[in-house]
Each structure stands twice: as C-alpha cells, then as structure tokens.
Image: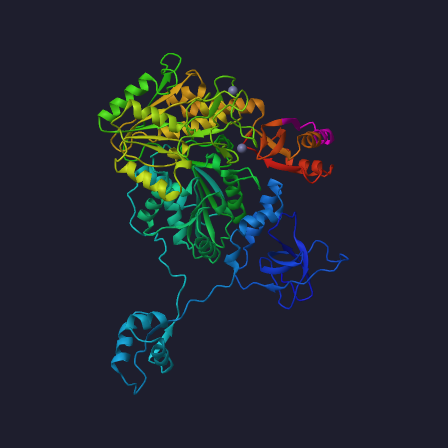
Amino acid sequence: MINFLPGDRVAVLLPVPLFGPLDYLVGDTPLAPGDFVRVPLNKHFATGVVWGSVADPHADFTCLPVKESLQTVPLPDESRRFIDWVASYCLAPQGAVLKMAMSVPKALDPEKPPPPLLVAADPLPAGYKLTPTRASVLQAARIPQSAADLARTAGVGTETVKAMAAAGALVEIAADIAAGPQPDPDHPGPILSPGQRAAADALRGQIGAGFAVTLLEGVTGSGKTEVYFEAIAQALAEGRQSLVLLPEIALSAQWLARFEKRFGVQPTVWHSDLGETERRRAWRAVSRGHAKVVVGARSALFLPFPELGLVVVDEEHDGSYKQDEGVCYHARDMAVVRGHLGGLPVVLASATPSLETAANVEAGRYGKLILPSRHGGASLPEVGLVDLRRDHPPRQHWISPPLQQAVATCLDAGEQALLFLNRRGYAPLTLCRTCGFRLQCPHCTAWLVEHKTGGRLQCHHCGHYTRRPEECPHCQAEDSFTACGPGVERVAEEAAMLFPEARIAIMASDLLPGPKAAAALVDRMARREIDLLVGTQIVAKGHHFPLLTLVGVIDADLGLAGGDLRAAERTYQLLSQVAGRAGRADHPGRVLLQTYQTEAKVLQALATGDAEGFARAEAEDRRAGGWPPYGRLAALIVSGPDASMVETCAQQLARVAPRDPSIELLGPAPAPLALLRGRHRRRLLLKSPKQTNLQAYIRHWLGLLKLPYQVKVQIDIDPYSFL
Ligand SMILES: [Zn+2]
Ligand SMILES: [Zn+2]
C-alpha cells in the first residue's frame, strides 16, 4: 500500500463535477489511497477521497494543505477502480461518479460511541454492603444495559448506578455494535424442486471462485428468487457481502417477505425513499462490512462494499436500470463490470432476457441456467388476441365486447381480473372541439394529461400542471374541450359502468403516495377485497395474486407506437410480464390482448408462446442493421435555453466531427422532445461496429470545439431512451 507522508503531494478526488482529482499537500498525518479527507476548495472546505499520486510531482504550482483526515473506514480499492471505470466508459466527470458513491455525506461524520453496557460483578467486591436499592440494581443488571437504562429499570438515580460502578459492583462489558441479527444461511427455507436445486447448486459453486456471469432464466413463477437465495446463502457462509438489484424496490414488500422466510431477518434496504437516518445507517453498515445482504435500486451499485462476494440483477431486462440523466449508465452492464473488477460472480435473472444478455450467452461470454416449469405446478396462461378492427368497443369506450364478456365470466366465478393500460391519468390529450387546439405543456414538447383525481392537467415530463381552462385560448369557444383516448382512470370509470357490482381499484404510481400505500393496495388485492384492478406498469413488477385469473391488456399496440430500437422487445417483455400475473397455483389464467395489429411479430409471439422465435427474429433484424447488441450507439443531446443557439452549436459539432469510415453520424435532428423543461434539444447519434472505441472518438471530437457555457452536451453511451 502506498503511503503519502507529510510534505508529499497527493491527488484528492472531490464529489463535484470535475474530470479528475486535485493536488493537495499532505499535512501532519500520513495518508493512504481511499482515505476520506477535508480539503480547502474555493474558500470553503470539502470532503474528498485520496485518489493516489499526483499526475506531475514536479509541477510548478503551490498546493493547499489537506486540513484533516477523517477517522472512518477508507473507500475500498475496488470501489475506486469502479468509479474510474464508470467515469471513463460513460464519459462522465470522475467527481460526478464519486458523488454517487458518497451519496450520504453525513455517514462520514464521527459516530458517537454507544454507551458501555454494565452487568453485575461476580463475585461482588469483598465487603460490599448490599442495601435494598443496590440489590434491585444488581437484580436489573443481570441483563447488560447502559447506566441510564439500568437506572430507569431499577427505578433509581443514575448517580447510584455510577457510584456502584465506581465501587466495582457493576462492570462494563464490550458492546458489540455489529451484532444485530444477521441473515442466517442455515435458516430452514422453502423446499426446492429438483430443477431449482440443480441451478442453486451451480450458483453456490461460483461463490469465491472468481468472475463469472450467469443468466438465470425462467418464466414468471418458476422460482428464480429462491434459486439465487442459495447463492446468497453460500456467500453468507463464506462471510462475504451480497448485493441484489431490483427495479422497483419501493414496491417489493413481497420480495422482502420471501427473503425473511429464507433467512430469518430482513436484508439492508437501499432506495431513494429512505429517510436520512436510515440512509446513514445503511451506508455505514455496508462500508464496515456489517450489512451482509443489501437489496436496492440501481444506485446501490455504488455503495462502498469492502467484502462483496456476489451481485444479483433481478429482472435484468428492466428499462429502469438505465439512468439517462446526470451520469448516464446502465446498472446491469455496470454490475457486470463491478463483478469483473472484484473477481466475483454476477447473476442476471429474468423471464424475458434482454437481447444484450442473450447475445452474450450466445457468444459464450455468459453462462445460462434455465428453470423449465412453473414452480408449484401451475400452468402458463393462455394468451388470446382481440382484433379491434372486428370487435370494436362503442365510441369513446375502450373495453371490447369479448373482453367485457371474459371479465364478466371471471367475476361471476368469484375470481379476480386485471385491466392493464400503461398510461396514467384520465386522458392523454385534451383538445378543443371547435378549432382543434391541443393543450400542450409550455416547457416541453408534450400534451398535458388530464387527471380526474386532483382535477388537473399535468405534464408527465416536467410536472407542470394547470386547471382545465373554461374557454379555448385559441378560438375562445366556451366548454369546448374534450378528452381524447384513455388513461387508467378512464378505463376504471368505464369498468365501473359495465360491472357496477365489482369492487374496483386503480394502481398507478401517481395515485399511490408511497411504498406503504402500494403495499396496502397489494394486500387488499391479496385478501380479495378487490375484484377488478386497473393498473399501469407498476402492476407488472413481481406482485403475486393467487386468485387473479384474467388479464386484459387495453392497448397492446401502445408500446409499439414510439418506434425506437427496443419498442418491440420492450413490449414483449412488459406484456409477457403482465401476462405472468394471471394464474398461479391451481388457477389457470387467461390473457386477452386488444390490438389493431394482430399480425405484429411481437403479438404473434405472445399468442403462440414462442419467446425464442421472437427473440431470434428480433436479433436477426438488429444484426442485419448493425444495431445493438451487434453494433454500438452513442447519443449526444445538445441543449440550451435559446433555440437558435442550440441549433447553431449542434450544426457546428456535426461539421467538425472527425471523419472515420467506421462511424456513422446521424443528425443533428430535433429530439422527439424538442423542448424539455424549458430547454431546447437537438440530438446527434453515433453508430459504429462493436469493436470501435466510441469513447475515444467522442473525447477527441468534443475537444475540437468550445461551446458557449449556456449550451450543454449530454453524452449517453448505449442509449435506451430516444426522447
Ligand atoms: Zn378552440
Ligand atoms: Zn412539461
């Protein structure tokens, strides 16, 4: 380990958007890489991390001295290499990536040591006189407690307790702060099927055996979670930490319950809804190695694990793993990098693997384990298509006659149904009947979505909202606005008319104020207090409703309309996940997809259950076009408050782009959201073969031009969002 001695220069990385560390002078205390230090920065002090030697030890400038070294666990070497790797791959400032790893600055503050615990001395000091008061304290002190707690339990003053300790009648014992209840790998868990057992054994064998990536594939209900739990059990047995990434941690009360069933206690949880104290506690527990299993959203990847032994990415195909603001990274891909840097296994679990992962399996880079059938013997739901060209619902209605019939039959049988539409609110568009004027967001290229609850029109991109105007701002016609198209609220309204007896609830993120409300709704559904659930994609996230036997998809074409690269793949994944909600245990399920495009490949694949055929055809299209995962993409979004300045800069960028026969430059074009939160946006897209070093190209390219400070260039390597 390199040490930096007093008087040396040292490079310190700060959690601010800088592309590298700054040089400082080591003070009286020697420093080592990873140490957290306070350093002067712009007339203030900032906390940073000792990153290593300075780039140029002979540089002719004076450095300011490090103010102090924080008495806390250093940032592990693996974490620092991971930050460097992510910054370099995503072309993000190193400091911005460090900021994600230092997301709880308060966790670095000195911790108050817990008060010492006292117990009765045995034997008591010779000649110690036992008064009734003293006897009651000794009685209470059979259980180790702090002086304050002991005084309270025995009903005496703290002075009495302190005097007894001074006399040697009470002695301190070492308080083990780490010893909270830990997940127990030997806790009796559920019985695994032979297929699950084989997969679990394979994963167990990978713990401690170096880097490996394994796709764990199995349909919804096949018991993937229980299988990777066994890998966690092995890591626990070997004293290593495990990290499980989940897409929607806030809604996974059912996942936590399954974990507790297997390991006896809850894991450490990490997501954006945690309070300040919980975040601080979790960050510290991870950094000290006390948190043995962490389950979290994508940002958990940047926690400072000193003893990481396993990473699991559940629902690896899920789009929410991609962050496309700030540091643009894909948590699934970066989890694989983290595994590689740490020399540890990575498990990617999915019922509908992404084409990226499938291509890596095919190329032999990733292993694959398949769980064949639904655990517990339930059969897969039967999927049918409703051709809306033939079976059209009446005007301004969205539930077709065949779907209405199916819901009625299901409810009559005392079973539950789900109507799925991935669109929040009441109606996606409000327009004037007289002149056709559409209500748009003033800050974004987007329509305002009507929400009946709360009675307002809202922009889903920037949050702007307004009341519905009395008269049309364009033609002044009064009471002329009409709602076009359905959102979940409107479908629920129609369902209430069609099935007046049914108990109906809506599940959409904006109607559930937090994880508790979501969990309460899931509970009501599980207790059969709801007959018909109308929901957006949050219902697709792993909830488990044994009596749900019918799923109706209101608009199966919705995801295909966007027209981006992954539209068909995403639609397939989302709809098959939703379909997976139907029929568990001994109730077979049925799924009806309403569509105008019965011939679309993705819907045919869903109807025939030919997942492999679909993936093959989709992969073929991508390979032929040189699109990911067989080629590479990078997006540059040029944005600023002034439209013409943004346009000029985007044009200039395109003009100075170095010629490279392997790189195709598309654009600049107005981004589909040409105006977002008041900023005008132009988009450039780079496309290249897989082996091209796009990062080096972009670094060189952006160095050729100095843009005005009002204009920002956001780089997105491997973009997923095409907005
Ligand atoms: Zn009008
Ligand atoms: Zn907006």
- Farthest bottom residue in view: 127
Q: Residue at x 37, y 59 (%)?
A: 180
Q: Quadrant of residue 206?
A: top left
Q: Quadrant of residue 135?
A: bottom left
**Does the magenta segment cover residue 698?**
no
**Figure label count:** 0
Quadrant containing the N terminus in the rendered view: bottom right
Quadrant containing the C terminus in the rendered view: top right
Give above or below for 594 relative to 181.
Answer: above
- Farthest top residue in view: 390
Q: Is residue 251 visible?
A: yes
Q: Is residue 590 visible?
A: no
Return the x and y of residue 675 as percentages of the image width and height.
Answer: 59, 30
Which region shows up in magenta? 651-669
* Between 599 and 76, the one nearer to me in the picture: 599
* Left/right of residue 362 with respect to residue 38 in the rendered view: left
**Dividing the image into four equal quarters, which quarter contains ligand 2?**
top right
Q: Residue at x 67, y 32 (%)?
A: 646
Give above or below for 496 relative to 167.
Answer: above
* Between 186 and 197, the one nearer to me in the picture: 186
**Does the magenta segment cover residue 659?**
yes
Return the x and y of residue 582 as percentages of the image width and height.
Answer: 31, 29
* Between 499 and 387, the one nearer to me in the picture: 499
Return the x and y of residue 644 as percentages of the image width and height.
Answer: 69, 30
- Farthest right residue in view: 60
Give above or below for 76 relative to 719.
Answer: below
Return the x and y of residue 473 as percentages of the image width and height.
Answer: 54, 24
- Farthest left residue in view: 413
Visual colour scheme:
rainbow
